[in-house]
């Protein structure tokens, strides 16, 4: 006996339904980044949660919330939503466990992200369109963010920019009430300035804003670049480079974004070798659901599994969080935006991003929110 189950009856009933409806075909189980760490099958895992013979809290906070189980299931069972409901229950009633799962790290990130220091707006007063680079990209390169904004200014009149966070880290931990409070800041930005469209670079931001701000248009930066074109001098600039494209699990069903990324890469001359699991079948980079914090061992195993799916030495992402996760491997990892807006990559001086410590990322972000145009 690990621990008596202490969950709301509605969640217990959902676990029971999942167990009863599961045929144990293991289509989800064989691809899941974490279930094998706890049980021999999804059906057995549900049974063990109900019996109290598995640490259901660790199970919930090892789920990368990637949606792959639901994508694979022929019965449309969504185990990810079950594990997320368990997270919500823990966040509401068991703060001690939440702290044990590393919530203090997430809380620190979110408090700073929504502080006036890191949450500035630029030229949003009269803007109908706003660019949101996202936390990870802003922490990576102020130069890239500045160049993207200047690129967008050529195609959009009076475009603004906001450095607000979408709040997904808080929501991923199960803190729904706090997420809603944070997200109100984005809603206020939209309503106070009559914004009609937000262009996002981050797939997580795209997912979060699309679900929570349905009254406005949310556009991926990669759709914009496909439509407006890459800088002419970069046409076929990377014709000697072969890479695999890591698709972000947060937008596994956004075919238009998948297509746009590949179109841009082909315009750049990149030769693409697809992962075994790509597009809607993609698997997580290891960072989904904040698992790099809540269960780093499971996260690292998934990172290595993912990069070893391809023999290609180069992996291109279009999510900076995915880049940072996959950098914990021996492959060359870079962002598609590196190929368009990073002179070191454009001039072939480097072939991969490098890992940076947390302090350096915050310093980069501080510089980014203070860029001068």
Image: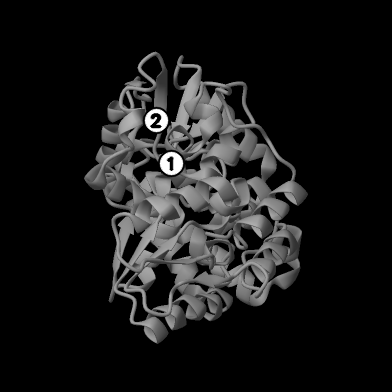
Residue furthest bottom in the image: 192
Q: Residue at x 55, y 76 (%)?
A: 182
> Residue 279 placed where, x, y %?
31, 37
Residue 97's label in the rendered image is: none
Q: Quadrant of residue 368?
A: bottom right
Residue 132 vertical placement versus 7 (above, below)? above
Q: Nearer the viewer, residue 78 or 330?
A: 330
**Element at badge 1?**
loop
State the image quarter where residue 118 is shown.
bottom right
- Coloring applied to the structure: one colour
Identify the mark at residue 318; answer none if there is no mark.
1
Q: Is residue 249 visible?
A: yes
Could you tell me residue 119's position as x and y percent?
59, 70
Badge 1, how many Cα within 10 Å: few under 14, some, many 20+? Answer: many
- In the image, 372: left or right of 367? left
Residue 290 drawn above or below residue 353: below
Q: Mark 2 vs mark 1: which is more N-terminal? A: 2
Mark 2 lies on a secondary structure that is strand
Q: Position of residue 103 (x, y in %)?
A: 70, 62
- Quadrant housing residue 159: bottom left
The residue located at (48%, 56%) in the rendering is 133
99 on left or right of 59: right
Spot occupied by residue 242 in the image (x, y as percentages of width and height): 40, 17
The alpha-carbon separation of the residues under discs 2 and 1 comes to: 8 Å
**Marker count (numbered):** 2
Asked whether residue 64 is in view, the answer is no
Residue in the image at 44% along x and 32% along y: 339
Residue under label 2, please give it.
Answer: 245
Q: Is residue 274 left or right of residue 37?
A: left
Query: Viewed as shown, does residue 308 lie left or right of 20?
Result: right
Report if the CB atoms under discs 2 and 1 are less than 8 Å apart. Answer: yes
Of residues 198 and 154, which is closer to you in this image? 154
């Amino acid at each position: 006996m690990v621990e008596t189950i202490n969950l709301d009856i509605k969640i217990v009933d959902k676990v029971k339904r999942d167990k009863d409806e599961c045929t144990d075909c293991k289509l989800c189980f064989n691809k899941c980044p974490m279930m094998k760490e706890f049980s021999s099958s999804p059906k057995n895992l549900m049974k063990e949660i109900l019996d109290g013979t598995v640490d259901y809290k660790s199970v919930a906070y090892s789920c990368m919330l990637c949606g792959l189980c639901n994508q694979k299931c022929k019965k449309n069972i969504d185990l990810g939503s079950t594990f997320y409901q368990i997270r919500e229950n823990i966040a509401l009633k068991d703060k001690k466990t939440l702290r044990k799962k590393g919530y203090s790290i997430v809380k620190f990130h979110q408090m700073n992200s929504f502080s006036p220091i890191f949450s500035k707006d630029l030229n949003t007063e009269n803007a109908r369109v706003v660019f949101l680079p996202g936390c990870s990209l802003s922490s990576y390169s102020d130069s890239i963010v500045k160049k993207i904004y200047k690129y967008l200014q050529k195609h959009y009149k009076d475009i603004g920019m906001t450095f607000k966070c979408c709040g997904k880290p808080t929501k991923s931990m199960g803190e729904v009430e706090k997420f809603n409070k944070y997200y109100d800041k984005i809603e206020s930005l939209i309503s106070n300035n009559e914004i009609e469209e937000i262009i996002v670079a981050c797939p997580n931001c795209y997912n979060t804003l699309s679900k929570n701000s349905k009254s406005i248009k949310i556009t991926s930066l990669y759709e914009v670049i496909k439509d407006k074109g890459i800088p002419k001098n970069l046409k076929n600039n990377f014709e000697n480079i072969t890479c695999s494209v890591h698709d972000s699990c947060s937008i596994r069903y956004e075919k238009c974004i998948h297509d746009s990324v590949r179109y841009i890469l082909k315009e750049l001359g990149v030769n693409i070798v697809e992962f075994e699991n790509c597009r809607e079948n993609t698997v997580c980079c290891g960072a989904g659901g904040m698992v790099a914090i809540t269960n780093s061992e499971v996260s690292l195993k998934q990172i290595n599994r993912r990069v070893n799916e391809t023999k290609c030495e180069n992996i291109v992402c279009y999510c900076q969080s995915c880049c940072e996760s996959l950098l914990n491997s021996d492959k060359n990892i870079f962002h598609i935006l590196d190929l368009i807006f990073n002179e070191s990559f454009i001039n072939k001086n480097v072939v991969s991003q490098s890992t940076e410590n947390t302090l350096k990322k915050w310093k980069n972000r501080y510089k980014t929110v203070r860029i001068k145009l």
